[in-house]
Image: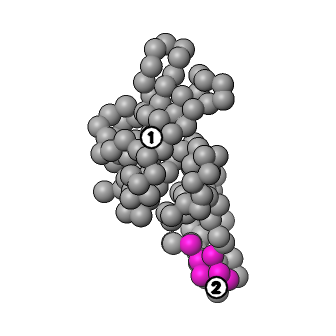
Amino acid sequence: MATRIRLARHGAKKQPFYRIIVTDSRAPRDGRRLDQVGIYDPNRKPSRVEFQRDKLSHWLRLGAQPSATVAQLIKRSGLAPMESAPMESAPMESAPTGIAPTGIAPMGSAEAAAGQSQPPPTPEPGETQT
């Protein structure tokens, strides 16, 4: 089960209040949660962000991935360095030379040079082959 640390919206219309929760990544935004690790109130000036440090570090050690917004809140609150693996939205490193992505041959390979990787062109209706 892939777990995420993300925001669940509560509060009245046009007055959002968020709980920072740990949930299954397939669950809806305000759906079932595994644990609550903090709160975020953007209506206050300055914004109020509170984390339960022990719960947060527990879930990060177990591999829960914070959403982009929660990652920013963690960083702003001074709870860095984060103890989890890199986020999914982080830029990926390029593949080493000579290793192709799954199912795609590199451009300099013998198959691509021989033209075997592309099917022959299909004639348009009414066109004859010569």
Q: Position of residue 22 (x, y in %)?
A: 38, 46
- Residue named by callout 1: 38
In the image, taking residue 107 as reference, residue 5 lies left or right, namely left
Task: Please tell me in which quadrant of the rendered image residue 44 appears.
Answer: top right
Answer whether residue 97 is magenta in the image. Answer: yes
Density class for disc 1 (Cα within 10 Å; few <14, some 14-19, many ≥20) is some
Q: Which residue is found at the position 60% from the left and 46% from the top?
A: 77
Start-end of magenta stretch? 95-101
Count up the numbered dots: 2
Element type at marker 1?
A: strand
Q: Main secondary structure of the magenta part?
A: loop
Element type at marker 2?
A: loop
Q: Which residue is found at the position 37% from the left and 63% from the top?
A: 62
Q: Is residue 96 visible in this depiction of the protein? A: yes
Q: Disc 1 and disc 2: Cα gap in Å? A: 46 Å
- Residue named by callout 2: 98
